[in-house]
Amino acid sequence: MNIFLMGGWMMWPLALVSVTVTAVMAERILLFSSCPFPPKDFTECLERAVEGDTARLLEALRKVPMLRRFADVMERTHPGREAALRIEGETVIKKLEKHLSLLSILARLAPLMGLLGTVLGMISAFSEIANAQAGVNMNQLAGGDMAGAHHHGRRPVHRHPGPVLPALLPEQN
């Protein structure tokens, strides 16, 4: 917590971004792990559906809760079926893409916020140098996580969940 406080006020917006990204990723992981689609023989199901045998494709679609309505629309024959399938497909895609634009914005914003915090820290450090009366005390200038690292004789370690997340996602068979 001390390192967090030493980082200054820019740490609070970065923490908010971090919590938001973690919440969206957890929600997306839960959604995608509940979609056991497509099955191994899905290409064969599609080929048979093109030939007119849609039974196996409909069975595969009904196994996925999000695609059950799509399967119901596909099973019925009526003049507006193609338009209804398109609308239902767009609805499913909207559900799958939910919050991805927020993740995109935050992924672009977070490094810029970190850079802004670094620049503000540098401005503060150079202000300390300019205001120093009798020489510069290096311990005063080494704010943020570098102060703790120098004090303990080790390099700072930054941890983030990025490389770990793909390992947590279940494989789709």
Image: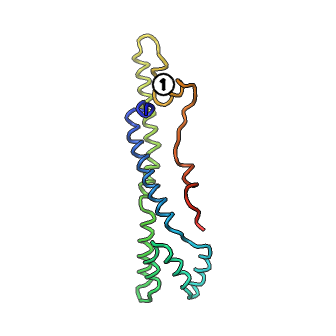
83 or 60: which is nearer to us? 60
> Looking at the image, which residue is at 41% across and 89% down?
79
Three-letter code for the amino acid on which mark 1 is drawn: Ala
122 or 139: which is nearer to us? 139
Q: Which residue is mark 1?
A: 142
Colour setting: rainbow
| Crowd around label 1: few <14 · some 14–19 · many ≥20 (10 Å) | some
Residue 125 in the image: x percent, y percent?
A: 44, 24
Quadrant of the image for the C terminus? bottom right
> Looking at the image, which residue is at 43% across and 57% down?
101
Residue 160 in the image: x percent, y percent?
A: 52, 44
> Looking at the image, which residue is at 49% across and 19% down?
138
Q: Is residue 152 above or below residue 100?
A: above
159 or 74: which is nearer to us? 159
Q: Is residue 33 above or below residue 49?
A: above
Residue 7 in the image: x percent, y percent?
A: 43, 32
> Looking at the image, which residue is at 43% across and 41% down?
113
Quadrant of the image for the N terminus? top left
Q: Quadrant of residue 57?
A: bottom right
